[in-house]
Amino acid sequence: MAARHFLTLLDLERSELLDLIRRAQQSKAEVKQGILKPTLPGRVLAMIFEKSSTRTRVSFETAIAQLGGHAIFLSPDDSQLGRGEPLEDTARVLSKMVDCVMIRTFKHEKVLRFASHSDVPVINGLSDSYHPCQLLADMQTFFEYRGNIQGKKVAWLGDGNNMCQSYIQAARLLDFSLTIACPDDYRPEPEIVESAAGHIEITRDPEQAARNADLVVTDVWASMGQEQEIETRAKIFSPYQVNRDLMSLAAKDALFMHCLPAHRGDEVSSDVLEGPQSVVWEEAGNRLHSQKALLELLLGVRH
């Protein structure tokens, strides 16, 4: 049987995503009670980091440890990837030795190539096109605070980046409306927008996006690898800052999310990030629980 991969959110059916959210919530409740269920004893997760991260590494290492398994950290500096071995060869070799591979890289094409040559499940820990693991945590967080997101309005402010494109897929799967406010030159990829027709609206007006939104989301204006664009992007995106005035246009019980790290005073004001509508710390912590549920799903654990 071919390995099942998680490269974008659309690798899940709607029912599977809802089940995964429920399992993540259950696992979180068990951890709070001091209950750890080693459903993946002896399983090994290889983690390839071409793009560094705090949250992704810690959440995946902790997840597999709590499930009874073990993680191996690999970077280009301490693997054959950094010495010119073809990605396809690394995929073939690793999948003979480990049970699952998480890869965090710059180009989504690398994730696709790796998965096509792997005999074990491959998880996209982040690429330039998608960040599906973060969406699992975001959706879990919304469900915990506000219940089902179906029919709700979500506002995305800023760059039409990998997070934005994963939100587009989430809107399609979970049937919510997503209004994206961004400059014309920073829109998400047209084919991704078209795939979720009926759920997506794009505007240049941040106030239009935020008005009556049940959830307001943003991300850094310049991602890793775009450091040379920081000053240019800061000028272009300054009207899209999520601040108190913008949040006042959203629904009274609207939540604010950010995948972190956040730059206070740039994409979000400090009073919003630290304010009562912000759930960013719970959102970050939920990476652990949603990824535990994901690992169990991909490795065939049934509940």
Image: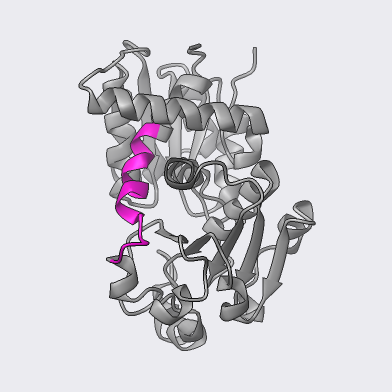
Q: Position of residue 5 (x, y in %)?
A: 58, 29
The furthest residue to the front: 252
Q: Is residue 75 visible?
A: no
- Residue occupying the point 58% across, 51% down: 166
Q: Is residue 84 above or below residue 293?
A: below
Q: Is residue 84 above or below residue 206?
A: above
Mainly helix, strand or loop, the magenta region?
A: helix
- Nearest the eye: 239 or 256: 256
- Residue occupying the point 55% across, 26% down: 19
Q: Position of residue 273 (x, y in %)?
A: 32, 67
Classify residue 2 as left or right of residue 85: right
The furthest residue to the left: 34
Classify residue 265 as left or right of residue 247: left
- Nearest the eye: 107 or 12: 12
- Residue occupying the point 48% across, 28% down: 22
- Nearest the eye: 103 or 265: 265
Provide the residue span drawn in magenta: 275-289
Asked whether residue 253 is drawn in magenta, I would say no
Q: Position of residue 70 (x, y in %)?
A: 28, 21
Asked whether residue 285 is drawn in magenta, I would say yes
Q: Is residue 291 visible?
A: yes
